[in-house]
Image (tube, rainbow, N blue to C red):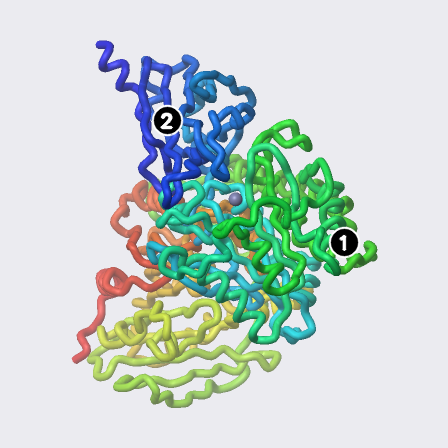
Amino acid sequence: MLAFLLLALTVNASFESGSLKSSEVKSPTHVVATIQGQADAAGRNYQPSWFYFSIGGLEDPAVKGREVTVDLAGLEGEYNFQPHDGSGDRNVHPAYSYDNLHWRYFDKTEWLEKPSRIRVKFKPEGERIWIARTPPYTLAQLDSLLRSIEGRRWVTVREFGRSVQGRPLQQITITDPGVPVEKKKTVWILARQHAWESDTSWVFEGAARFLSGADPAAADLRRRYVFQMMPTLDPDGIAAGGVRFNRNGYDLNRNWDVEDARLMPEIAATRKAVESWIAEGHSIDFFLTIHNTESADFLSGPVGAHGSHAKEIGERLNALLKSATHFSPTGGVRDSAAGEKAPGRLTVDRWVFEKTGAPSFLMELMTNPSPAFGRPALTSDRLNFGGALVRLIDEALTNAPASSSHYSTPMRERLNAYEGTLERWLQDDIVNGYAARQAKLWHRDYSSVEAYLKSVEPNRERYRAMFAIPGVKPTGAPHRRPFTRISGIRAEWVTVPLSGGITAEGLLAMPASASGKVPLIIAQHGIDSYPERVFGLEDESGVYKAYGRALVEQGFAVLAPMNLSSIERRNRVERLARLDGTSLAGIEFERMKLLLDTVLEDPTIDQNRIGFWGISLGGMAGMYWTPLEPRIKASIITAWFNHRRNKMAIPDTRYSVFLDTTEEYVFLRGWLTEFTDSDVASLICPRPLMVQHGKKDGIAYWPQVEEEFRAAQSHYEKLGFGDRAELVMHEGRHEIELPSGLAFLKRWLGANSGK
Ligand SMILES: [Zn+2]
C-alpha cells in the first residue's frame, strides 16, 4: 500500500528546456528535487542555476486537498572559479504554473542549510504543477514570436550562423525600409547569452513586439534607428535545459578574445555579424547585452574609458530606467574595465567597445524579489520593460526632452496602465462573456432541417447585417479574355463591369472535355496573393499545391475571384468603406455573387453543384460567404478556422493574435458578440464543411482548432449529419492539404470524369 501511495506523485523534466538531475518522492506529499547544474569544458564553474520540471498526480486521493512540500537541492557550485555552498540562493523564489503557460512565483519559501535547500509548499490547484527557476522561455516560444512579426515589411529575420548542434542563430532587423540606412542610428541588442537567463527572453520579446508593432512611437523609432536584435546565442542550451555554457562547455559571454569557430561557433558567428556590419560602413551607436543574476539590477559599461561619451549615455539610461521602470540599481553604471583581464574572460560588451568604440553595456536584471515590487518581476513586467527599454535607449541617446508627439516615459507607463485596464475589460467580455451571449442569441431547433434553418435565420440576418453589403449592379456585358499561362488548361479572365466603375473579376478554368454539366469550385486565394497562384503559377512557397489545376483535372470548373490582397491596401479601403457605411468584406461578397451570376450563364456548369475552397484570407472569405450564399453547397476552409475569440483578442505565444498585427480590416464591428467560428459553421450546417489545419501553422494553436471544430461539429451531429463536418489536422504548415480536399469535393459534389 505504501509503495502505491509513493507512486502518486510523478516528476518529469523530459520536455523542451526541462532540467532536473534527480528526484525522490519521500512521502505522498514530499518531493526532494535535485538540480542539474552545468560545468565548463575544464570541469570548472559548475553552476546549478536552472531547474524546470513538473509534478503530476496532484489529484490522486493520497495527495488531493493536502499541502505538498518540494525541496530543491543541489545548489552548491562555483562562479568565476570561486566555490560556493549555494547560500546565494537564499532568496530565490521559484516560479510555478498549472498550465505551463501562465506563471506565478511562490510568495513564501523556506531556506534549509547544510546542505542548502529551497523549500516551497503549496496546496495543489490542478492535476500537475510546473516549477522553474524563472518563467521558462523556450525555442518554440521564440519561433512563434518570429512567425508573428516576420511578415511585416519593417522586420527581417535572418540566420547568421549555427550553434554547436547546428541550430540556427537568428538576427531580427527592425527598421523602416523607406528611410536610407545612413540616416539612421544603429542599436544592437543581444539577449540570452546564457541559457538559464529566460527572463531576458521575455524582455527581448517585449522589445521586439513593441518595435515591430503599431504604436506610433515604434514607427518613429523605426524611422530613426536600425535595431539589430539577437534573441539568443545558445539555442542548444535552451533546448536542453542548459545553464551557462555551450554544448562544448564554453561560456558565451567570456572567450570573446578567443578565435575558435569549432569550439565556439556561436561567438565566431556573432563576431562576424558585427564585423560585417561595420565593414559595410555602418555605425553601432549603442550596444546592449541583457543578463540575469540573483540579487542586483545594474548596468556595466566602459564608463572609465578616456574620451568616451559612453559614461554620459550610460548614466542617463541608468537614471531613466530607474525612474520609469522596475529596474532598481543601487548606484551608477559599473565600470566594465574593472576585474580580471585573464585570457578567455573577455565579455561581448567589452569586445564591441574595444572593436568599435561604441557605447557598449551589459545589463543585469535580478531574478530575486525586486525592490520595485517586493516580489520577482512577472513575465508581463518583463514584456513591458522590453518596450520601455528601447524607448529609453532612444531618450538616452538623443537627450531629447519630452515633446507633444513623444510622451515622457512615466506618462507612457501611466497610459500603459490605463490601456491595460481597458484591454482586460474588453478581452474578458469578448472571451469570457461569450457563452452568456451565445445562450441568449442562439436558439437552435434540431427537430428537422427545416426547423433548424428557421431557428438560425435571425442569426443569419444579423450576420448579413454585420457586413453592411452595398447595393451594386452589373452595368454591361462581361468582358472575357483568354488566359493561356496554365499549360494544358482552358482558362479566361472574366470581368464584370459594376455600378460606380468598379468591377468583379476572376480567373475561370474549365475541364478539357467534359460531357454534360460540370460542378464549379470557387477557389479563393490568400493574403499577398492572386488567382494565378491557385493554379500553381508563381507559387514559390508551394502552399497552394496547384489545387485549382488538380480540381480542373478532376473534372471541376474552377472560378478564382481576385480579392484585394495586401494588408495595407485592405486597411486603406476598409477605412473608406466604414465611413461610407459598408465594409470591404461586404463589397467583396457582392462582387463574388455577381461574378458567379455571370459564370453560371454558361449552360455547361451545373448550378446545383457549386463548392468553395479557400486558403488563409481565402478561408476567411469562405467563412464570410458560405453562410450568406445558398448556392454554395459544400465548403473547405484551409488555414483560417480558429478559436475565434482567442485568435482575435488574446495575445499568446502559441499562435499569432490579430490584436498584435496591423490588420485592422479583420476587426468587423460586433463580430464576437455572437459569431465565433463554430457558430458561423452552424450557419453553413447542414451543408458539408471541411476544415484543414496544419499543426505547424502558427495562425492557430491546433488543440484550440480541434476544440472549436468539435463545437461546430456538434450542430451537424444533432441533426444527424455528423459525417458532413470533417476536420483534417495534418502535420504541415500554412498550406493546402490536397488529397483530402479533392476527395471531399468529389464526395459531396461529384465530378464528371475528364473525358
Ligand atoms: Zn548571463
Q: Is residue 2 above or below residue 165?
A: above
Q: Which residue is mark 2?
A: 34
In what element is the residue under mark 2? Answer: strand
Distance in Å between CA atoms under marks 2 and 1:
45 Å
* Residue 226 in picture, x, y percent from top left: 62, 65
The quarter of the image holding the C terminus is bottom left
Camera sees residue 386: yes
* Residue 538 in picture, x, y percent from top left: 38, 79
Q: Residue 487 falls in which quadrant of the image?
A: bottom left
Residue at 31% across, 73% down: 546
Residue 61's disc is none
Residue at 21% across, 83% down: 513
Camera sees residue 466: no
> Upstream in the sequence, badge 2 or badge 1?
2
**Mark 2: C-beta under 8 Å from nearest atom of ligand 1:** no
Residue at 37% across, 15% down: 29
Residue at 57% across, 75% down: 280
In what element is the residue under mark 1? Answer: helix
Q: Can you name the residue that lies furthest to the front here?
A: 342
Which of 236 and 85 lies nearest the eye of the viewer?
85
* Residue 501 in picture, x, y percent from top left: 59, 82
Q: Residue 210 falls in which quadrant of the image?
A: bottom right
Q: Is residue 281 above or below residue 711?
A: below
Residue type, label 1: Glu
Q: Which residue is mark 1?
A: 312
Frontmost of labels 2 and 1 is: 1
Q: Can you name the residue that lies furthest to the top here?
A: 1
Residue type, label 2: Thr
Mark 1 nearby-residue class (10 Å; few <14, some 14–19, many ≥20): some
